[in-house]
Amino acid sequence: MPTIKQLFDMSDSIAVVTGGGTHLGSAISESLCELGATVIIASRNLNNCKKVAAKLSESGLKAHALQCDATIESEINSLIESVIQTHGKLDVFVCNAGGSTPDNDFPSASTEAFRETITMNIETTFMCAQAAANVMIKQRYGKIITIGSVHGVMGTDKRLYAGLNHKRSSIGYFAAKGGVINLTKALAAELGEYGITVNCISPGQIPKPTVKKEMIRRMVARQPINKMGNPYDLKGAAALFASPAGNWITGQNLVVDGGWTVF
């Protein structure tokens, strides 16, 4: 029987993290590197990727930066081709690229912004997962990790924003993240026979530094664990799904939210 240390050993793994130079992507990249994986950090902002890769490399970890706009299918294919040419295989693909197009609150939200947000999340996840799966099927092994959100499993509490000049996530973002979660389940059903697992991590409220203190106070007061999340709170979930420890887990949506969704 393998030890728990062996189950979390990724020293022979090659992993790609799209959006890897961002707020949450950098923590996921760090997690996989710390388990021993060689991590290719990719996004359309190459400078951010290089900064994250350099920081990890300075700590003796194996990280590289590549540019890729995950909304463009040809760039995703080129990214994976480059990884295969350099490393010979692809063990883990984290579909972290996504986002939300600024929009008005519903019902004055625009159809164009809604479509753009769907593209940024569902379509990018579909294209990344498809490109990764085409390699992993040949290997008969692989792990695909998608990124959902608490917004994908519930609506918004508008009372939190009362009296604050704070923009809520667009209605398209809620729809898109819900789609990513169910896409994950569908992909898990399709790819299980090839030894490929597909799982989703849905973060809760992990604010960027620009979020106002009063907004943070209100969010903290609403959830059972009375503190806001940090990007590093996702490291454990990423480690589980990416490592051999998660070999018998597929089609799951792990909500990491401090209890936000229990109400």
Image: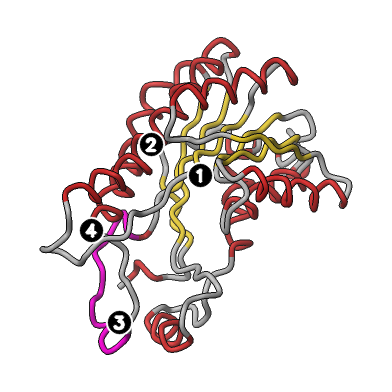
Image quarter of residue 191: top left
Q: Residue at x 15, y 64 (%)?
A: 106
Kind of residue sitting beneath label 1: Asn
Q: Earlier in the sequence, mark 2 or mark 1?
A: 1
Q: What element carries label 4?
A: helix
Query: Which labelled disc corresponds to residue 96?
Result: 1
Comparing 232 with 263, the one in front is 232
Horizontal and vertical percent for residue 82? 66, 20
Vertical side of 77 occupied by 202: above or below: below
Query: Which labelled disc corresponds to residue 107?
Result: none
Q: What element carries label 1?
A: loop
Q: Are marks 2 and 1 in contact (CB under 8 Å)?
A: no
Spatial CA distance of label 1 from label 4 is 20 Å
Which of label 2 and label 3 is nearer to you?
3
Q: Residue at x 30, y 82 (%)?
A: 160
Label 2 crowd bin: few (<14), some (14–19), many (20+), radius 10 Å: many
